[in-house]
Amino acid sequence: MEPIDIGLIVSGGMLVLVLLGMRVAFAAAMAGMTGLIWIFWAKKGYDPEQFMWALTVSVKTAGQVPHSKVASQALSLIPTFILIGYLAYYAGLTQALFEAAKRWFAWVPGGLAVSTVFATAGFAAVSGASVATSAVFARIAIPEMLDIGYDKRFAAGVVAAAGTLASLIPPSAILVIYAIIVEQDVGKLLLAGFVPGAFSAIVYASLIIGMAMTFKNFGPPVRGFTWRQRFESLPPALPIVFVVLTIILFVYNPFGGDAWGTPTEGGAIGAFVVFLVAMYRGMRWHQLKDALLETAKLSVMIFTIIWGVLIYVRFLGFADLPGAFSDWITSLNMAPMLILICILLAYAVLGMFMDAIGMLLLTLPVVYPAVMALNGGEAVAAVDSTFGMSGPMCAIWFGILVVKMAEFCLITPPIGLNCFVVAGVRDDLSVQDVFKGVTPFFIADAITIALLVAFPWIVLWLPSQV
């Protein structure tokens, strides 16, 4: 049996395990080990005496993965980004952001929902975890929306959908993972997330305003805040601005010259600043312990998925499945843009059954080379490319698109994790209520993705300045 056939059989078996409920990390590691043993044993003609040799070589091959990849400096960004989010919560920055957004934007139709979106986008700029963002604002924003007459399902939907912005707006753990898997510049990818993330927030807000203007008593505006009250709400939220500027300056220096450091250093300094703010605002020991424990739990979960999937990726390399898939994709008698759209639609379907990080880790080793091949290769110049951009810029553009699809998957049934989190925080809400509430935001996400595909400069303008 050829290695490509083994690759297809093992990959199919892994997908079955995932659909049956096995954790992605364990399913991928099991598939990768099985595939490696199979391929090495096949090279020896399935000689029973050579099975132990195949097993030994496979274990050594797989055993090199965890250290060689996780020792990467770029991955140290993940725990620091997650820690920033948890410390920001205990520092009271979430409440300060929501209060500032409410005083400045609540006067528009659907004002509290719009304020929630913008406050969540602000918090996403210091939190690398969508789930944590949704959990925090489910406690803060939903009660206030219910108090003035919002439908509880829509209020929950706003929080669940807005929480997905943390996947795109830096610091983003998913963007870092994408950069590691496809071996692209982490700093440029983080920069690329700012404009599309803000754009997504504006699309969400526009949808809410349009619905509030269309349906009577849908989302009454909240008025009565003076200009003095509005400006008084800004200083408590300034640490957010400082952290964002720190991360930007450690990735890209807008004043010219080299950046001030690396994204890793920027994340560490951002975490330290938020820690000082939290201490100044009275964070207690048990709160610090909770923040550290939650950071450790989420980081370990992400790293475990990475370990398991990288063993599977090592197997894919021996099976040459990425190369075969790339050749098949480029041989299709279809417009390249149509093929790209089909790939994005496949992500939408796959995301109904898998979590976002696992989905990207499992698919990118195969899909990414195919997309690069469609554009003309990783080293292609913009003038010779299919999509009108160089290989590195195409990698960034595609990265933002798939992360946006990962956001979309966080609110799609039956696995939409943000919806389960919001329902878990609120006793008066069922998961079905939250899924009904996020339905309008499917339209908003579809519009956003279509615009990012049609106008790549929305994604590429900022990273092209570096």
Image (spheres, grey):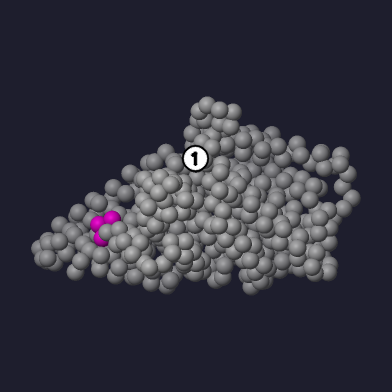
Is residue 318 part of the magenta span, yes or no? yes
Q: Which residues are magenta?
A: 315-319
Kind of residue at disc 1: Gly
Q: Is residue 462 above or below residue 331?
A: above
Mark 1 packing: few (<14 Cα in 10 Å), some, or many (20+)? many
Label 1 element class = helix
- Residue furthest to the front in view is 383
Q: Is residue 385 left or right of residue 127?
A: left
* Majority secondary structure of magenta residues: helix
- Residue furthest to the top in view is 257
Asked whether residue 314 is in view, the answer is: yes
Can you identify the residue that label 1 sits on? 187
Q: Find residue 131 and report its horizontal and vertical position in percent.
A: 58, 56
Is residue 329 part of the magenta span, yes or no? no
Q: Nearer the viewer, residue 68 or 105?
A: 105
Q: Find residue 210 and report its horizontal and vertical position in percent.
A: 75, 63
